[in-house]
Amino acid sequence: PMLFFIHGGGWKGMSPRCHSGTCTHHALAAAGWVVVVCAYRKEQWPQHIDDATTALEWAMEFQGVSQQQPPLAIAGNSAGGHLAMLLTLRAIGRGISVMGCVLGYPAADPYDERGVYASLPIGCWWPFRYRRSQSLLAWYFERMVLRGNAELWDSARPLQHELLSEFPRTLVFHGELDSVVPIEFSERLLEALAAARPQVAIPSDCLVRMPGLRHSVEMDGGAAVQILITGIVTWLGNRCHGLDSLGLDGS
C-alpha cells in the first residue's frame, strides 16, 4: 500500500524534508508501506494542488506494476491537510480509488465560514485590504495564497466540493490547545463529512483529540504521540482490509 503525504507550512513554507510527519512515516515504512512526500510550488494558487496532483500520478505510475491499483491513502498536516482534502477530491473525480485519509490538525476551511479564527474590529483597506471583522486566516489566504484573486476561492474550499459525499473514511487528529489551527476546524470537518453522507447511518470518521497539545502534535514526542502513531498505522492497516477500527481501547 502507499501513503501519499502533503506537508504543511502555511501554504508558503516548509519542505518534504522538513515537516512534522516524519515519525509516523518511519512507522508506516516499517509496517511495509510505501510513503511518498511530495514537493510543490507555493508562489501562486493553484500551483500547490496542481503539483501535488502531478506527483500523485507519478507515484502511482512508478508503483503500479500490475493492472490493479494498490491501496492508496492520502494524508497531510495543517495546510497540507487542506491540500490533501483537495487532492483526494480531485483523485476521486479522475476515477482514482482512495481508501482513506489521515489529516493532522487540518486547516480544512481557510475561508473560515464560521468565523472561528481571530478577527479585528476595524478595517484597513490600504495597504492591507483587510475588511472589518474578516477572519485573519481568510484574509491571509486570500492575500498571500490567492494573491488577491477572490474568484479562486471556489477551488480552495473542500467542504463545499460537489464530490464531498464520496470522500473516503477519514482519521483526524488535533491538539486541543492548538492556536494556529483551532480544533474547531476539525470538528467542523467531521460535521461536513457526516452531512455530506446522510446514507451512512453510523459515520466511521474519527477525530482524535490530543489533550494539552498544540500545533504539530507529533513534535511533542510523549507517550500520547507514540500511541497516536500506533493508532494511525493500525487504522490504515485496517482500512486496507475494509475495516474502520482505530485499534485502541476498542474504539
Image: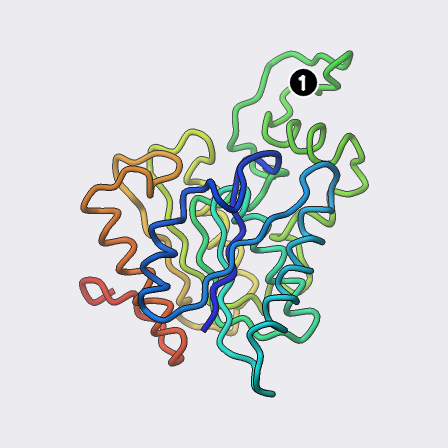
Q: Residue at the spot x=54%, y=46% of the render?
A: 80
Q: Residue furthest bottom?
A: 67
Residue 185 x %, y %: 48, 42
**How many numbered tags mark residues here?**
1
Residue 73 x %, y %: 49, 66
Give, as a three-letter code, the residue at label 1.
Arg
Instruction: Indicate whether 216 appears above or below 98.
Output: above
Instruction: Indicate whether 169 appears above or below 180.
Output: below
Instruction: Indicate whether 45 appears above or below 85.
Output: above
Label 1: state its secondary structure.
Answer: loop
75 left or right, relative to 162: left
Within the image, what quadrant is residue 196 found in?
Answer: bottom right
How are the colours assigned in the image?
A: rainbow
Identify the residue under disc 1: 132
- In front here: 8 or 89? 8
Q: Residue at the spot x=37%, y=64% of the render?
A: 29
* Within-10-Å neighbours for mark 1: few <14, some 14–19, many 20+: few
Q: Quadrant of the N terminus?
A: bottom left
Instruction: Indicate whether 213 appears above or below 66.
Output: above
Q: Residue at the spot x=71%, y=32% of the render?
A: 142
Residue 227 x %, y %: 22, 54
Q: Quadrant of the C terminus?
A: bottom left
